[in-house]
Amino acid sequence: MSRVAIIGSCITRDLWPIRGEADGLLYVSRTSLPSLFSKPLAGLRPAATAPNGLTKYQHRAVLADLQKTAAAQLVAFRPTHLIFDFIDERFDLLSVGGALCTHSWELEASGYLRRPAFKGARPIPRLSPACDRLWREGAAEMAAFVRATSLNGARLILHSARWAPSRRDRHGRRRPLSGTEILHGRPADVEQHNRLLAAYEAEFLKLMPDMAVVEAPEHRVADDRHEWGLSPFHYVAAYYRDITRQLEALGVRGLSPRGAGPSARAA
């Protein structure tokens, strides 16, 4: 039976049919490689329950990024397969008190940014040279971490993805995708982020031990009927089916292309 750890986003997680927790699956999201290996945020007092409408998982993801617990979880989980995708590597970073944090929507919604622990936080824009340097350092640290721990026995997989420049509407027509934002009111340049993803992947493949790559570039089309709504990372059903086949060929079990939602049944 495969035990799969994901460091990535919903494009990989949604290949599993079960909502919430799933046996044999560890999902680390809303983080960035430099944040993953940063020191913990000092002075944070976590809320006892998920704040402001966040789900329990979303709250745990925020806390894992702030408290830096994910690396230890990965080792303890002892995965047979470790899958990376870099779609969550779109958020800016925050530097505060020597710690790095991921400025995700969930962090904003949590209310933690208004806490004293974030006093003096300095943004590091994702497309800046400073963030690029930090990311490359984080990638090198991840490669060393994998080699030095039990993760070196896992099958390493890169799920290569990009922001979709077009969408399929509810009538099946292909249209340009416009108005893309990372956080509300903060537009994003799709081409710039796709170039960044290509550079990240090339650097990662150079640093890491042998990795398999799964990708479905011909199906990188956003779907108006996706169950999570329209987004440049919520693809048409054919995308999930193709990636599922590739992962199953690498020994990953328990998959179902649920992520495409209603269109998966209609396609």
Image (spheres, grey):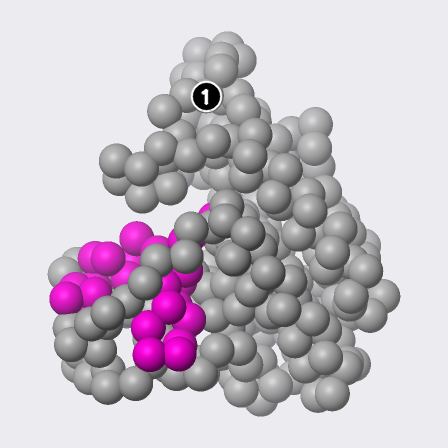
Dot 1 crowding, Cα within 10 Å, few <14, some 14–19, many 20+ = some
Quick check: can you spot residue 35?
A: yes
**Of 51 and 134, which appears nearest the observer?**
134
Q: In which quarter of the image is the N terminus?
A: bottom right
Q: Residue at x 53, y 68 (%)?
A: 34
Residue 255 at what x, y percent from top left?
62, 55
Three-letter amino acid code at disc 1?
Answer: Leu
In-image side of 219 versus 134 (left or right)? right
Q: Nearer the viewer, residue 80 or 60?
A: 60
In the image, residue 159 sits, relative to residue 50, either above or below, namely above
Query: 240 or 70, which is in the foreground?
Result: 70
From what the image shows, is residue 56 above or below residue 117? above
Q: Determine whether, in the image, residue 177 is placed left or right of residue 181.
A: right
Q: Is residue 216 magenta?
A: no
User: Left of 138 or right of it: where is 227?
Assistant: left
Residue at image position (39%, 30%) is 180
Return the x and y of residue 157 as percentages of the image width and height.
73, 60
